Image (spheres, rainbow, N blue to C red):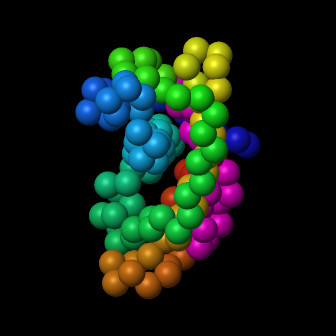
Amino acid sequence: MTVTSSTTVRVRYAETDQMGVAHHANYPVWFELGRSDLMRALGVSYTEVEARGYYLMLSGLHVQYRRAARYDEELTLETTVGEVRNRRLVFSYVLRRGDELLATGTTEHVPTDKSYRVARIPEDILEKLRGA
């Protein structure tokens, strides 16, 4: 089952350049907002994951920019849980302005313990991420 959440993002002035265009470095930050919202909706917040002794370290990031986002525009970010494995998570993102596609992307995460050693995510957390 594919699980998707929707997050509204309004481009802030501080996120833009002199031309009023959102800087490319903001897209991964917006992806994090979407990922956090999705995980909360699934009942497994980052706070809970970390309280249980795990970090979800970013191991890969890909963004495909298609159109510019501009100051004060309201955007919709759809975040989907992709691959869910004991030692690897992948999230996918689609950013739109209305019906217009602005960007797509993925992030890959490796779970670690508090000593930053690769760890296995507990099964109950995996089940929530799978939408079970």
In the picture as drawn, the residue positioned furthest to the top comes out as 98
Q: Is residue 125 or residue 108 the one in the foreground?
A: 108
Along the horizontal axis of the image, is 104 left or right of 39? Answer: right
Query: Which residue is located at x 41 percent, y 32 percent?
Result: 22
Residue 12 in view (yes/no) = yes
Residue segment shown in magenta: 76-95
Nearer to us in this view, 128 or 89: 89
**In-image side of 105 versus 41 (left or right):** right
On the image, the x and y values in percent for residue 24 come to: 46, 43
Instruction: Count numbered badges in the picture.
Output: 0
Q: Is residue 78 magenta?
A: yes
The answer to whether any part of residue 131 appears in the image is no
14 sits left or right of 79 in the view: left
Where, quadrant-wise, is the N terminus in this rendering?
Answer: top right
Q: Residue at x 36, y 18 (%)?
A: 72
Question: Does the magenta segment cover residue 26?
Answer: no
Name the magenta segment's main secondary structure: strand
Q: Residue at x 54, y 76 (%)?
A: 120
Looking at the image, residue 39 lies above or below residue 102:
below
As displayed, is residue 38 above or below residue 72?
A: below
Q: At which x and y percent is residue 101?
A: 64, 26
Q: Quadrant of residue 51?
A: bottom left
Q: Is residue 52 above or below residue 82?
A: below
Residue ranking furthest to the right: 1
Residue 104 appears at what percent x and percent y?
A: 63, 40
Which residue ends up furthest to the front in the rendered image?
Answer: 18
Residue 20 pos. (x, y %): 37, 24
Please give the name of the residue rendered at 65% of the width and 16% of the height, measured from the top-left corner.
99
